[in-house]
Image: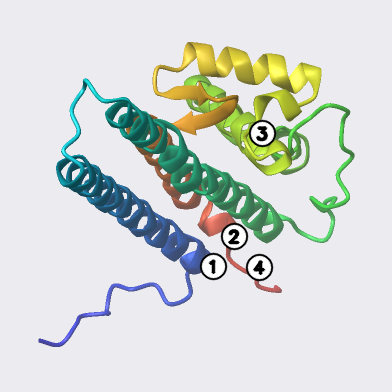
């Protein structure tokens, strides 16, 4: 069956950005499938080990093996699978926000790269100021969505700069991360490291991808190359 591409906008200036969003959604689904497969493999290996050695809760070895399994499931797998994903998710948002800002700008406007940065601001806070002050656009009108994006940026920084180890953060960042871990039901700290649950990662992924879809849809026309009159 031949595909119909008649409605496809081949001149869409944000086509690659849109494709990245769809690819990232596939990436998330593949990630969670891989985590589930890993969990099932580990459960089977634990069961085989306990059966092979005829261990039960009366044996010390049973508790050691079960404790190692719990640490793997509750700490290591969430940390090493979902931690890098959180950093990539934030990078996707940051890169598309920057791409749109660059596409909208005309030669008379200050570039995003030369925009004066204020102290103690994250990249997306700087981007929001640039959108407002230079482009005359509100980057994220929904206050609740913006609050979640700020949380994502803080978690990303903790992963990128301290490998998710809370004690390695600066005092100010440490206090903020401890509060986030305390407040969010599916973000935890195991052995001093941040760990992300499936529900949190799924929700924050949906939020970011939906917000990027909205951003692209509302500003696609502004990103089209301007014709000289």
For the point 48% across and 20% down, the residue is 144
Distance from label 2 to label 3 (Cα)? 33 Å
Callout 1: helix, strand or loop?
A: loop
Query: In 3D space, how far apart are the residues under numbered discs 3 and 4 (Cα atoms)?
Result: 40 Å
Crowding at dot 2, Cα within 10 Å, few <14 / some 14-19 / many 20+, comes out as: some
Nearer to us of marks 1 and 3 is 3
Location of mark 2 (residue): 223
Q: Nearer the viewer, residue 10 or 59?
A: 59
CA separation, marks 4 and 2? Answer: 8 Å
Q: Secondary structure at mark 3?
A: helix
Q: Which residue is mark 4?
A: 226
User: Label 2, label 1: how many angstroms apart (C-alpha)?
Assistant: 6 Å
Instruction: Give x and y (percent) for residue 205.
Output: 41, 41
Dot 4: few (<14), some (14–19), or many (≥20) neighbours within 10 Å?
Answer: few
Q: Is residue 137 visible?
A: no
186 left or right of 66?
right
- Tag 4–tag 2 contact (CB < 8 Å): no
Q: Residue at x 55, y 52 (%)?
A: 92
Q: Which circle's residue, 3 or 4, is located before the other in the chain?
A: 3
């Amino acid at each position: 069956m031949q595909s119909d591409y008649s409605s496809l906008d081949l001149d869409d200036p944000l086509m690659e950005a849109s494709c990245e969003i769809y690819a990232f959604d596939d990436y998330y689904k593949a990630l969670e499938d891989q985590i589930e497969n890993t969990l099932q493999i580990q459960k089977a290996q634990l069961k085989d080990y306990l059966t092979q050695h005829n261990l039960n809760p009366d044996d010390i070895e049973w508790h050691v093996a079960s404790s190692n399994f719990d640490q793997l499931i509750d700490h290591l797998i969430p940390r090493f699978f979902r931690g890098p994903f959180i950093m990539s998710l934030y990078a996707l948002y940051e890169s598309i926000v920057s791409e749109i800002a660059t596409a909208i700008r005309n030669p008379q406007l200050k570039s995003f790269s030369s925009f004066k940065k204020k102290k103690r601001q994250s990249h997306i806070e700087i981007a929001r100021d640039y959108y407002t002050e230079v482009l005359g656009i509100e980057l994220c009108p929904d206050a609740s969505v913006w609050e979640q994006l700020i949380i994502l940026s803080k978690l990303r920084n903790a992963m990128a700069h301290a490998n998710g180890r809370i004690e390695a953060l600066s005092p100010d960042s440490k206090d903020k991360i401890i509060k986030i871990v305390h407040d969010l039901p599916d973000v935890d700290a195991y052995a001093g490291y941040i760990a992300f649950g499936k529900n949190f990662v799924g929700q924050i992924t949906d939020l970011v991808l939906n917000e990027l879809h909205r951003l692209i849809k509302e500003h696609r026309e502004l990103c089209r190359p301007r014709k000289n009159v």
